[in-house]
Amino acid sequence: MSLARKILSLDDDSPDLESVLESKLARSLLTVRDSTDTNGSPNRSPLVRLLSLLKRRPILSIRVFCWRRKLRDSPPIIAEELASAITMASRARNPLLAHKYFNIYKSLVNGPFLFNVLMTAYMYNGDVEETFLLFYKLQRLTEYGPDTVSYNILLSLCSYRRLVQEMESVFYEMEIYGIPPSIKTYHILIRGYLRSGMWEQMESIFGSLKKPNTSTHLLMLRGYALAGKLEKMERMYELVKREVHTRGRSLIWAMISAYYKVGGESSRRKIIELVKLVGEEEHLYFPHLHMVLISVYTEEGLIDEVKRIFDALNRNMVIGSHRVMRTILAFYLRYGDVRYLDWAIIRAQIVGWNLGTGRVTDL
């Protein structure tokens, strides 16, 4: 069994962790520095590789790092290893520990690298004030100052929080100080305007890009779908169709919602085609779109498809809205399927929906 698997088999507070780490295998693995790989490129630290395998278990990761720190006669902790530890502390929702590690080692690392890691930790924990304060320290109290990554972190925070004016101010400051934006910078801006429904600004940023990449086109596909700009959405879809089919199911649903808002026979046909791109029953796990599909199938007279959705909802216990149930009942009433209508009403009553008042309790 590999070292990572042995550690992952333990509970977060297991007393057996130290004995696993004290083994000859662990000591030899975690205290050796590999200089280069077979291609001549620098290798990642063995400790960093291990922590990346433990990233879903941040408490265990932190315990491993603490053990490694205390080892005598071993190579000193390097910046990459410290960055992993700060990230794990952030994942464990422990920004104080992340700050502690930063303070211990910041004098050993030149440049904004560790500041950026800690800023990311604060951002991950939703601490807007601490993120900005650390940025200002980097800006005013160091000889090197913030870099593009530093500004991207602030932009991401503002974008996620829909702080559009602050986001624009940060980007303007980048221009003033001559900090070169990366493609990621523009993606963050597009995402910020997208979240805030500012479609013209979103398109303006997109139009300013000389070399948009696939990620840019995927972002704009979502933006045009949310904005209801179907022609532009369809043009963007043609550019990234392969990526959407392989890893863009949420984008497929965004397109389905866009067509549904417009309505009409053509839109319904396109919705039916898009649903085919999703797994056989995967669409049944998107409750907010149940009504869309039921309504479309009803208009197209696809009775069996509606029954399949209702059966799957009942089987998987994911009905959580009385609006979904009402839509289903209306469908059966419209098509005169008394057997299924009776069954649906009984089911609604069992789960606590009062047919007279529309009250519902989630399953």
Image: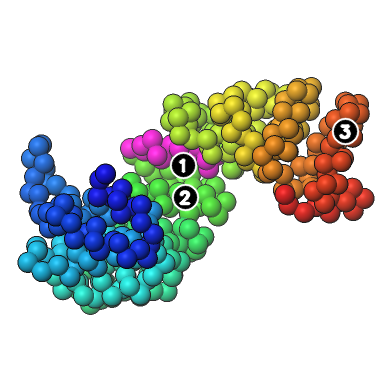
**Three-letter code, disc 3:** Leu
Please identify, in this view, whether the residue under mark 3 or under mark 1 is nearer the observer.
3
Residue 82 seen in the current view: no
| Mark 2, residue position | 191
Labels 3 & 1 near each other (Cβ < 8 A)? no
Q: Mark 3 falls on what kind of element? A: helix
Q: Amino acid at mark 2?
A: Arg
The colour scheme is rainbow
Q: Earlier in the sequence, mark 3 or mark 2?
A: 2
Q: Is residue 36 visible?
A: yes
Residue 341, disc: 3
- Magenta segment's dominant SS is helix
Q: CA distance from mark 3 to mark 2?
A: 44 Å
CA gap, disc 2 and disc 1: 7 Å
Location of mark 1 (residue): 219
Q: Which segment is the magenta one?
A: 211-224
Pointer 2 with pointer 1, Cβ within 8 A: yes
Q: Nearer the viewer, residue 99 or 154?
A: 99
Question: Is 219 colored magenta in this rendering?
Answer: yes
From the viewer's perspective, is 195 left or right of 155?
Answer: right
Q: Position of residue 86 (x, y in %)?
A: 30, 65
Q: Residue at x 9, y 63 (%)?
A: 74
Q: Residue at x 55, y 34 (%)?
A: 252
Sequence-wise first label, 3 or 1? 1
- Mark nearer the N terminus (2 vs 1): 2
Judge from the rendering whether residue 193 lies leftward or rightward of residue 318; answer left or right: left
